[in-house]
Image: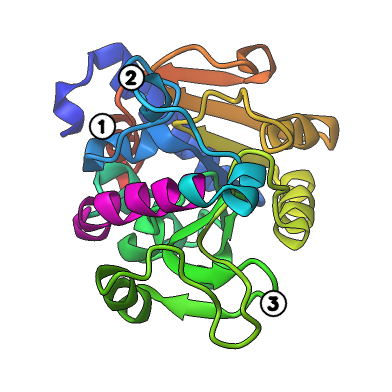
């Protein structure tokens, strides 16, 4: 795949791979752009999800039955594509770096679980925006698997409630108006400050507080490298910017692991 890259970009990717190999502690920060090659649309791109449908905020989900039913309809409608999606070359390359001991942690804005599918263990992935791979109760936090909830929905329970406390159930993703999980954000901040090099892949770096993490790396004396198809909000902080398809660039970056 890397042979498709322009030669200059391929050489720069290989050089970045060498810098990663020499770094003391490497953290990856991934956004929606790493998963588009797996058929999962991003949110803010030219064909992003929010171009065609308005997001439902948490306050609406909690207060408006119609909004709650529409939220669930969207999630259930998109579930087959999400569950059948497979890791692409970008996810697999990060997993290879992890297995080689060159990548310590993945911080992600994604909710698709593809980095886990690629082989990075769940305990070394920090999901800032939650996960679409399971459902939880907004009141007591109890976790439910889709295999339990989907039959209830298909049986007519379009606003499912928790069997324990009666609270509203919701796929475990962060909605507009909902705070990021404090423990995940705090851990991500510690990892960002510890990183000698943060590799940003597929994020526009426009959504805060998550986008502040590369800034924390730089303030702590580390470096930031960005792999993204488009300019980002923090390009000025990066020591290296590789503009192009994430999968091909990361495959070239792992050239010496072949």
Instruction: Give the magenta-colored segment's residue range.
Output: 67-85
Q: Residue at x 48, y 37 (%)?
A: 31
Q: Where is residue 164 shown, x and y percent of the image?
A: 60, 88
Bin the neighbour count of mark 2 within 10 Å (Cα to Cα): few under 14, some 14-19, many 20 and up.
Answer: some
Judged left or right of residue 35, residue 218 is right
Assign a secondary structure to mark 1. Answer: helix
Q: Nearer the viewer, mark 3 or mark 2?
A: 3
Q: Residue at x 63, y 73 (%)?
A: 167
Q: Label 2, secondary structure: give it.
A: loop
Query: Mark 3 touching mark 2, by CB under 8 A?
Result: no
Q: Is residue 23 covered in magenta? A: no
The x and y percentages for residue 22 are 57, 44
The secondary element bearing badge 3 is classed as loop
Q: Residue at x 54, y 34 (%)?
A: 200
Upstream in sequence: badge 3 or badge 2: 3
Real-space Cα separation, disc 1 to disc 2, in angstroms = 8 Å
**Magenta segment main secondary structure:** helix
- Name the residue carrying label 1: 248
Q: Which mark is residue 244?
A: 2
Residue 84 magenta-drawn? yes
| 135 up-or-down from 57: above or below | below
Mark sitting on residue 140: 3
N-terminal label among 1 and 3? 3
- Residue sitting nearer the eye, 134 or 184: 134
Kindly indicate whether the residue at mark 2 contacts the one at mark 1 (C-beta within 8 angstroms): yes
């Amino acid at each position: 795949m890397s042979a498709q890259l322009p030669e200059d970009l391929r050489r720069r990717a290989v050089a970045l791979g060498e810098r990663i190999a020499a770094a003391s502690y490497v953290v990856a920060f991934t956004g929606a752009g790493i998963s588009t090659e797996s058929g999962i649309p991003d949110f803010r791109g030219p064909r992003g999800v929010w171009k065609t449908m308005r997001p439902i905020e948490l306050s609406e989900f909690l207060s408006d039955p119609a909004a709650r039913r529409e939220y669930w309809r969207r999630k259930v409608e998109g579930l087959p594509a999400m569950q059948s999606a497979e890791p692409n070359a970008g996810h697999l390359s990060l997993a290879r770096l992890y297995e080689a001991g060159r990548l310590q942690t993945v911080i992600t804005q994604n909710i698709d679980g593809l980095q886990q599918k690629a082989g990075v263990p769940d305990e070394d992935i920090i999901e800032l925006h939650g996960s679409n791979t399971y459902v939880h109760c907004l009141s007591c936090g109890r976790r439910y698997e889709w295999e339990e909830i989907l039959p209830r929905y298909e049986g007519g329970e379009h606003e499912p409630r928790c069997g324990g406390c009666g609270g509203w159930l919701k796929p475990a993703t962060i909605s507009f108006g909902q705070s990021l999980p404090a423990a995940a954000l705090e851990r991500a901040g510690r990892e960002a400050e510890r990183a000698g090099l943060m590799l940003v892949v597929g994020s526009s770096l426009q959504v805060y507080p998550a986008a502040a993490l590369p800034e924390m790396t730089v303030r702590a004396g580390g470096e930031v490298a960005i792999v993204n198809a488009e300019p980002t909000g923090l390009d000025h902080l990066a020591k290296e910017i590789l503009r192009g398809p994430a999968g091909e660039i990361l495959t070239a970056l792992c050239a010496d692991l072949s």
